[in-house]
């Protein structure tokens, strides 16, 4: 070997080892670190290939708290309930700092603007979509869902995921953003769906890498932003003065001082409102249809609330939904089993978790996906058992312990009750109208999604026909 190269290598190695030793001296109580041997990249490749499996194996090997070094960052996972409280409640960890980069990459909202507006927007959204206010959406949502379900005709065969998407995208968008200001023709809706699907599919990559590597994704983003520019200016033009008459989009415009960022914020809200709700609705239906005993019970419930099939019930109230708790439990159970791989905060000051001190600068992660498979809290964790939700005090809007698909504390998803209601309603409308048969075996989940609900990995076609 060339002598100069040998010297260089030695120097690099010394530097790396030196850095590690220094780190150990500064942070003697840091958790075990899985760093691999490739400088900077760390274990990015192994981790990226199957993040959920990687987390599970590391937990077995290193215990409940460990650090993964990848792409120059330290990601510290806390996989047991003891650390969860600190994750959600501690003032030493920060949500904005953890997601700011992703927001900047995906919708080009700079850090300063994001920090300035996030809290006000969050409070507004949380208020508008709080349980006591959900009835405001109910009528429109029901009408919209019904209208798009109607377009399915008397029978057909389709990929279930597409079926759900074609109905939820336009219905949710018309409800939250306002109906009259959106493109409404069928071809415009499908163009919108195409671009949004592309945007959603690569959102996770886009949040982590320069978007110049994602040309089609950038094009779709551009298309969506252009559409949203028109939509937001129409929403501003028609913004009513009475608070009750405003759409969520119009409330967003009122809350946002930097109006020229409206399309970018709208795209972010649009993504948040759809990215998880659509796959959760898909999984809820798959789980129901593939469990004949549960499917039958649900149909009996529906008949007892609405009368016999073929009634074409078009208006469903919150009281009707209350009489169908098993379907709501199925929604929650689907969420439990298909939750995001991780939610993240940034450590601002060293924080103690169990016997470890997590150094400032680390990304602190918990994994809803794995927490929801802890048999201590969810007996038979891999089984789809909607009855376990009997024990939750849903009347008081409480979930089961350690159910964290929406995050927790001050940053808990402000759209969670809206999402649950929307999916509950969709499932009721679907099952009341059509009989479903799965044509494929139940697909496996991707195990790839860190920030979002797990997606199906294979086809899942259904046959549907009007109930008689
Ligand atoms: C089943 C469906 C949904 C799931 C699983 C979900 C999950 C989440 C999660 C995990 C977070 C981040 C919390 C954290 O990191 O601490 C979040 C935040 C958020 N979600 Fe959802 N969400 C869903 C539906 C919705 C819907 C329907 C909307 C809007 C209509 C929405 C709007 C938001 C917003 C605006 C935030 C950011 C909150 C902040 O700034 O702190 N989500 N959601
Ligand atoms: C990007 O779009 C082009 C043209 O629409 C298409 O041919 C190509 O397959 C797309 N690439 C990816 C990676 O989706
Ligand atoms: C909104 O996002 C687009 C696309 O990234 C960007 O070109 C534009 O500058 C952003 N808007 C503002 C006001 O920065
Ligand atoms: C923490 O340290 C104490 C005392 O050193 C020990 O008894 C305990 O088992 C440790 N706990 C964990 C979770 O490692």
Image (tube, grey):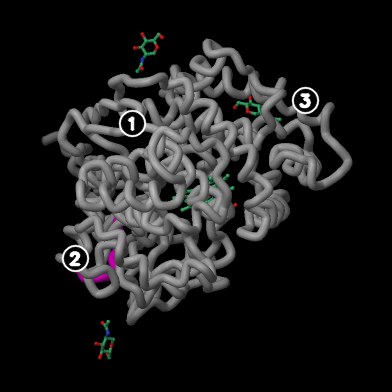
| Percent coordinates x, y for residue 2 in the rendering | 15, 34
| Percent coordinates x, y for residue 103 in the rendering | 56, 41
The quadrant of the picture occupied by the C terminus is top left
Rounded to the nearest angstrom, the CA distance separating label 1 from label 3 is: 46 Å
The quadrant in which residue 458 appears is top left
Q: Residue at x 37, y 26 (%)?
A: 162
What span is in magenta? 62-68
Q: Residue at x 76, y 38 (%)?
A: 250
Rounded to the nearest angstrom, the CA distance separating label 1 from label 2 is: 37 Å
Residue placed farthest to the front in the image? Answer: 308
Label 2 vs label 3, nearer the camera: 2
| Percent coordinates x, y for residue 115 in the rendering | 67, 51
Residue 67 forms part of the magenta stretch = yes
Label 1 vs label 2, nearer the camera: 1
Q: Residue at x 25, y 27 (%)?
A: 461
168 to the left or right of 443: right
The quadrant in which residue 5 appears is top left
Residue placed farthest to the right in the image? Answer: 241
User: Is the residue marked by circle 2 packed among few (<14), some (14-19), or many (20+) residues within 10 Å?
Assistant: few
* For the residues bearing labels 1 and 3, Cβ distance under 8 angstroms: no
Q: How many numbered marks, from 0 up?
A: 3
Give the residue number, with chain letter if any, for mark 2.
380
The quadrant in which residue 254 appears is top right
Q: Which mark sits nearer the N-terminus, 1 or 2?
A: 2
User: Is the residue marked by circle 1 packed among few (<14), some (14-19), or many (20+) residues within 10 Å?
Assistant: few
Give the residue number, with chain letter if any, for mark 1.
468
| Percent coordinates x, y for residue 16 in the rendering | 29, 55
Q: Which mark sits nearer the N-terminus, 2 or 3?
A: 3
Per the rendering, the mark at residue 233 is: 3
Q: Secondary structure at mark 1?
A: loop
Q: Secondary structure at mark 3?
A: helix
Residue 395 forms part of the magenta stretch = no
């Amino acid at each position: 070997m060339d002598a100069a190269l040998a010297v260089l290598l030695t120097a690099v190695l010394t530097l790396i080892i030196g850095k590690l030793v220094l780190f150990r001296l500064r942070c003697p109580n840091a958790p075990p670190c899985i760093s691999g041997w490739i400088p900077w990249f760390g274990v990015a490749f192994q981790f990226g290939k199957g993040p959920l499996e990687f987390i599970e194996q590391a937990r077995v090997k290193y215990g409940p708290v460990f650090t993964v070094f990848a792409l120059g960052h330290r990601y510290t996972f806390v996989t047991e309930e003891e650390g969860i409280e600190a994750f959600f409640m501690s003032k030493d960890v920060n949500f904005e700092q953890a997601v700011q980069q992703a927001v900047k990459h995906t919708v080009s909202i700079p850090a300063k603007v994001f920090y300035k507006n996030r809290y006000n927007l969050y409070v507004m959204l949380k208020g508008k979509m709080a349980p006591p206010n959900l009835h405001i959406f109910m009528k429109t949502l029901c009408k919209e869902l019904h209208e798009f379900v109607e377009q399915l005709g008397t029978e057909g065969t389709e990929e279930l995921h597409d079926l759900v998407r074609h109905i939820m995208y336009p219905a949710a968008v018309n409800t939250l953003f306002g109906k009259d200001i959106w493109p409404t023709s069928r071809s415009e809706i499908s163009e919108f769906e195409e671009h949004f699907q592309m945007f959603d599919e690569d959102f996770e990559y886009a949040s982590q890498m320069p978007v110049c590597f994602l040309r089609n994704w950038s094009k779709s983003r551009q298309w969506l932003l252009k559409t949203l520019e028109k939509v937001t200016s129409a929403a501003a033009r028609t913004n009513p003065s009475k608070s009750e008459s405003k759409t969520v989009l119009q409330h967003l415009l009122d809350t946002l001082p930097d109006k020229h960022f409206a399309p970018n914020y709208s795209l972010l809200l649009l993504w948040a409102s759809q990215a998880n709700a659509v796959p959760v609705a898909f999984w809820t239906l798959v789980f129901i249809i593939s469990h004949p005993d549960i499917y039958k019970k649900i149909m009996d419930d529906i008949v007892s609330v609405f009368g016999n099939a073929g009634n074409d019930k078009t208006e469903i109230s919150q009281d009707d939904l209350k009489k169908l708790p098993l379907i709501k439990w199925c929604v929650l159970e689907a969420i439990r089993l298909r939750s995001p791989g991780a939610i993240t905060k940034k450590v601002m000051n060293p924080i103690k978790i169990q016997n470890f001190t997590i150094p400032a600068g680390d990304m602190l992660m918990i994994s809803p996906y794995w927490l929801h498979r802890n048999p201590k809290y969810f007996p038979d964790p891999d089984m789809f058992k909607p009855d376990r939700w009997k024990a939750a005090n849903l009347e008081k809007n409480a979930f089961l312990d350690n159910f964290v698909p929406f995050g927790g504390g001050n940053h808990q998803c402000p759209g969670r009750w809206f999402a649950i209601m929307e999916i509950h309603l969709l499932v009721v409308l679907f099952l009341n109208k059509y009989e479903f048969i799965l044509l494929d075996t139940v697909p496996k989940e991707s195990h790839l999604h860190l920030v979002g609900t797990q997606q199906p990995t294979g086809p899942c076609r259904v046959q549907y026909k009007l109930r008689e």
